[in-house]
Amino acid sequence: MFLQDLLSRNTGSSDILVLTDQCDATQCGVSQDVALVPSTTLNYTDLNVHFEFGGAINSAEVNGNIASAPVAISNARVNEQFLGAIKETNLPFGQENLSGLVGAGFPAPIASPIEMELIQASLPSNAQGVDVSNKFLNTILSNAPLFTRLILEGQFEQPMFTVTLERETFEIGGNIGQLTLGGLPDGVLNDSLTWVPVRLYTPQQGGIPSPSDIPNEGTTAILGPQNVVNKIYSTIASSPQNLDPTGSTPPEIPCNVPVALTFVIGGKQFPLDPRDFFLQQSSTETCNADALQLMDTPSPTALMSWVLGATFMRSNLVAFYFGNFTHPSRDPPRIGFLSTVPANASLEFSSDVKKASASGGQFPGSMIVAPTGTFAATTTNSVGVAQQPTPISSISTPQESGRGDANGSWFKLK
């Protein structure tokens, strides 16, 4: 199966999940428009797998069977890749016409339930931590998630991938939606990124016991601590006195006031483009601050305070460097950030609000499906990041050209 035909990316986990023709509207909420994977194309095991996604507000679960199948993404291919064949879920696949998720997160037990289920099924019930570690190392070439295997097999030039996302509302365009496998996009220099190390988890925190600690990182949405998020809400809300104290209902804010939200990473500021602060809006008068939500309370196996997802990644190029899987101290994993927010972003925001008000009071919205393969940018910004080649603010329906993923990304294998 070609993953870019079917799936949405998810850097919050490492595994692949697919909807099969055994998952109906009642169990999975799918419609006739969703391209289901024929179950006859999968080689099923007798193992089940369970996934949990989301945070304090939006949570979801997936139950399924572990199966295997040939998998390809762009020109990279694995002949027999373990994946989850979904049989029950409340993830909104049907609403977005998606057939599943392709996990691209750093490998770790809490990020790859499939790999851990395979390991545990092959060990006796009294196995010790070192037994799990040895089995992990001995089976990594066959049991590991897709991106780990592609890197170990030398199908990537470097053990990394890079993501930029396009803007889908306010002013459609901005960065090109692109997934670059094995390096940085052409024209982007390594020294231009701010690189920060990835936390290595101990066995008590969900990591693999000695001799190997495997990093864990996930990015699915902008989620933050309740006290900080509520403080931001109270600052920008139209009616602070009516704030939901639980934070489960994001406040309404004036659409014509640009929100200045900045994250400090590695000692450098990374502002959020005010045009990226909102999800799809239907009015230019009042907007919902729904791109910022509450994070679950940190736990021993999930120590992060913030999750920076698609909203943040529309304003920044993000590079995930995996390093050395089995000996991370030799080549540690890290994440690189490069801001793509223009200096006049607030002025552009105000201009877009005026244009939307003058054209009926609605912001444009679109999801662009783009082709895969070799891509040469015709337009770049000041830091070399590819931009949408033509003004597309009038597009309101998905446009298809060749093979693409549901987020409209170009796939490029280096």
Image (cartoon, rainbow, N blue to C red):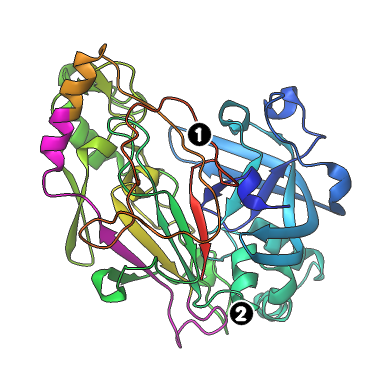
Q: Using the rendered image of the protein, determine whether residue 300 is visible from the camera's viewpoint.
A: no
Badge 1 marks a residue whose secondary structure is loop
Amino acid type, residue under disc 1 in the picture: Gln
- Looking at the image, is 326 positioned above or below residue 113? below
Q: Give the quadrant of residue 196.
A: bottom left
Q: Is residue 42 or residue 176 the one in the foreground?
A: 176
- Looking at the image, is 370 positioned above or below residue 208? above
Disc sitting over residue 154 in the figure: 2
Could you tell whether 83 is left or right of 252 in the image? right
Viewer-nearest of discs 1 and 2: 1
Please report whichever mark, 1 or 2, sits nearer to the chain's N-terminal start. 2
How many discs appear? 2
Q: Residue at x 72, y 68 (%)?
A: 143
- Give the residue at the far bottom of this rendering: 330
Q: x, y percentage for residue 50?
A: 68, 46
Magenta highlight on residue 332: yes
Q: Is residue 346 or residue 311 the one in the foreground?
A: 346
Magenta highlight on residue 372: no
Q: Using the rendered image of the protein, determine whether residue 74 is visible from the camera's viewpoint.
A: yes
Q: x, y percentage for residue 110?
A: 57, 58
Amino acid type, residue under disc 2 in the picture: Gly
Q: x, y percentage for residue 36?
A: 74, 37
**Residue extent of the magenta highlight:** 323-351
Q: Residue at x 43, y 32 (%)?
A: 57
Q: Which residue is mark 1?
A: 399
- Looking at the image, is 351 positioned above or below residue 114? above
Q: Residue at x 15, y 36 (%)?
A: 348
Badge 2 marks a residue whose secondary structure is loop
Could you tell whether 407 is left or right of 305 in the image? right
Q: Give the quadrant of residue 72.
A: bottom right
Q: Residue at x 68, y 31 (%)?
A: 34
Circle 1 residues within 10 Å: few <14, some 14–19, many ≥20: few
